[in-house]
Every structure is written in C-alpha cells, then in structure tokens.
C-alpha cells in the first residue's frame, strides 16, 4: 500500500472516531470526559497528524527514488 493510500486510510478511520467522540461529548461533559479527551483523544489526534505527514513525506521520497531509478 502506498504511503498516500495509507495516510488516507488512517484519516478515513480517524474521522468516524472523531465524530463519535464529538457526539459523545455533547452528552458526557464532566471532568472525567475532559480528562479522557486530554489523555487520549488529543494525543491520538496529534499522533495521527504526525503519522500522516511522515507517510506523505515517505511517499514523496519513494516516488523520487523510483524516478531516479528509471
């Protein structure tokens, strides 16, 4: 699977979870939910963004390497 396809797959998997979490916070809004968000959702979102950026960069490097081989 190419880096860009993988990055898209990660994003398409993250979006439903993010939407469900947003819906959940409309009915679960207390210190525990805020702690959960701070400890899990925020770091997960940051890690997903970093992973997507790294995969896109890797895809570009691989594409350049393929062009150089030809």
Image: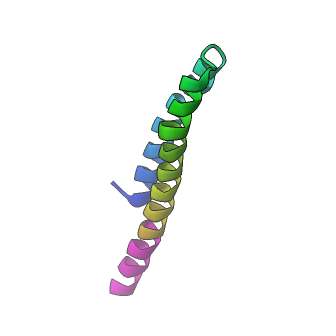
Q: Nearer the viewer, residue 65 or 28?
A: 28
Above-or-below relation of 22 to 45 = above
Q: In this image, 52 relative to 68: left or right?
A: right
Q: Nearer the viewer, residue 24 or 54?
A: 24
Residue sitting farthest toward the front: 31
Q: In this image, 20 relative to 10: left or right?
A: right
The N terminus lies in quadrant:
bottom left
Is 68 in the magenta? Answer: yes
Is 63 in the magenta? Answer: yes
Residue at figure coordinates x 55%, y 39% from the top left = 38
Q: In this image, 39 relative to 62: left or right?
A: right
Above-or-below relation of 32 to 11 = above
Residue 35 picture location, percent across and down: 54, 32
Q: Which stretch appears magenta?
A: 59-70
Q: Nearer the viewer, residue 54 or 66?
A: 54
Residue 8 picture location, percent across and down: 48, 48
Residue sitting farthest toward the top: 27
Helix, strand or loop for the magenta stretch, by majority: helix
Residue at figure coordinates x 43%, y 61% from the top left = 55
Residue 42 picture location, percent across and down: 55, 43
Above-or-below relation of 54 to 14 = below
Residue at figure coordinates x 62%, y 20% from the top left = 30
Counting the numbered discs, the total is 0
Q: Nearer the viewer, residue 2 or 34?
A: 34
The C terminus lies in quadrant:
bottom left
């Amino acid at each position: 699977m190419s880096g860009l396809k993988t990055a898209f797959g990660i994003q398409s998997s993250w979006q439903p979870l993010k939407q469900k979490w947003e819906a959940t916070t409309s009915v679960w809004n207390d210190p525990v939910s805020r702690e959960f968000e701070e400890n899990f959702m925020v770091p997960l979102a940051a890690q997903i963004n970093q992973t997507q950026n790294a995969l896109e960069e890797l895809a570009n490097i691989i594409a350049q390497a393929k062009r150089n081989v030809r």
